[in-house]
Amino acid sequence: MIFKSNLLCKIIGFIHLINNQLYKSEYLTIFKRLGSHSVLALIALIVIGGATRVMEAGLACPDWPLCYGSFLPFNHMNLRVFLEWFHRLDAFLVGILILFKFALSIIWKNEIPNWLPKTYSLLLFLVIVQGSFGALTVINLLDSYTVTGHLLIAFLLLITTISINQNLENDDIEEPLIWWRFLLFFPLLLTLIQSFIGVRLSSTWSAHICLSFNKQCLILNTHKLFAFPIAFSILLIIATAIYKRSLLNENWKYLSALIFLLFSQIALGVLSLKTNLNEPIFIIGHQLNASLFIAILTTLIFKNPFTKKGLNHSLNSQMVGINS
């Protein structure tokens, strides 16, 4: 009787474990899907913001948060007003999406990992800061440092969102490859610095002044020189992945995308200078490439080849207990 009772308890525990894991996976699947939508929305937001800056539409709506005192300014609508209005609309939708995820994490806090509500609270804080910088860009009449901070916080939102998504995919971690993460972090940091220089370049008109009058060329020259360490660090990552064949097999799609983005980014930069920054499509493409570059590097950092425990490990231990 004691043997049968113990066996029954183990079987019940085994069934409860399966149901609990499947139950929790439904919640995590929802957060993963919302996270994927957030990444796409943030990249779109950054690109639209870049288009707004390139088209000199940052002050097309003279007030904030409305535009000419209304939610949809039909009477004042033109390309520049539309870009600024749509940029604000996209930012509002991104904020609502992140607020929705934060609310769900509070409601389902007993069914999800403990770190998730805390991380979403950080994400919500970044949204509030980002909205504040958006208001300041209008109030301060496109002050260069305000515009730069606005973009960098958008990148932090993108990096945080991708890190959450990848940690949801790799919830159980035994041994991350720290050296691989460090190797990937270096070009990510350089790209963020390069983006900072790029925004300063456009928001202070330094590029136009340098190309037209050969003055104030320090920022432009620094921006061009920074392409070399970024390119070297990416090539070093590719060489390391080829040497460590398992890394190449695991991440070849992302690494191929990095190589493509690297050379296309250089080409777009050269074309932008050759056309004296008069072709918005090249500059907007340059901004899009930078966003994708940061997104892929962040994904690779948190998409380490992990040794997973998870459901299979738990089920195996339960099966051992039942068999014994």
Image (tube, rainbow, N blue to C red):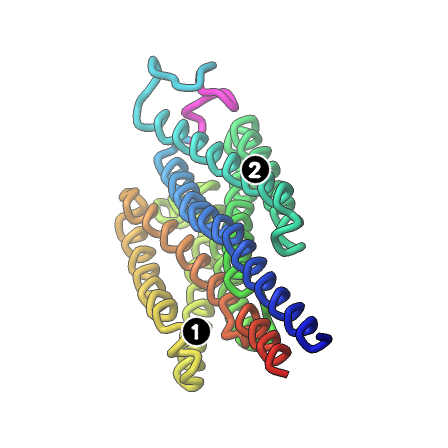
Query: Splitting the image into 4 quarters, where does residue 280 fall?
Result: top left
Q: Nearer the viewer, mark 1 or mark 2?
A: 2
Say which residue appears at 48% left-offset and 60% top-offset. Answer: 191
| In-front residue for pair 163/13 | 13
Residue that label 2 marks:
99
- Magenta stretch, main secondary structure, is loop
Amino acid type shown at disc 1: Phe
Q: Which residues lie in the magenta part?
A: 58-67
| In-front residue for pair 61/117 | 117
Is residue 266 shown left or right of residue 311?
left
Residue 42: % across, % down: 45, 45
Say which residue appears at 34% left-offset and 16% top-offset. Answer: 74
* Figure check: 127 above or below 282: above
- What is the number of the mark on residue 232? 1
Q: Hey, which residue is sitting farthest right in the picture?
A: 2
**The C terminus is located in which quarter?**
bottom right
Say which residue appears at 39% left-offset and 19% top-offset. Answer: 72
| Labels 1 and 2: the sequence-earlier one | 2
* Figure check: 89 above or below 220: above
Q: Say what secondary structure mark 2 lies in.
A: helix
* Figure check: 189 above or below 131: below
Q: Residues within 10 Å of mark 1 (few under 14, many from 20)?
A: few
Say which residue appears at 31% left-offset and 51% top-offset. Answer: 272
Q: Say what secondary structure mark 1 lies in.
A: helix
- 9 is within the stretch colored magenta: no
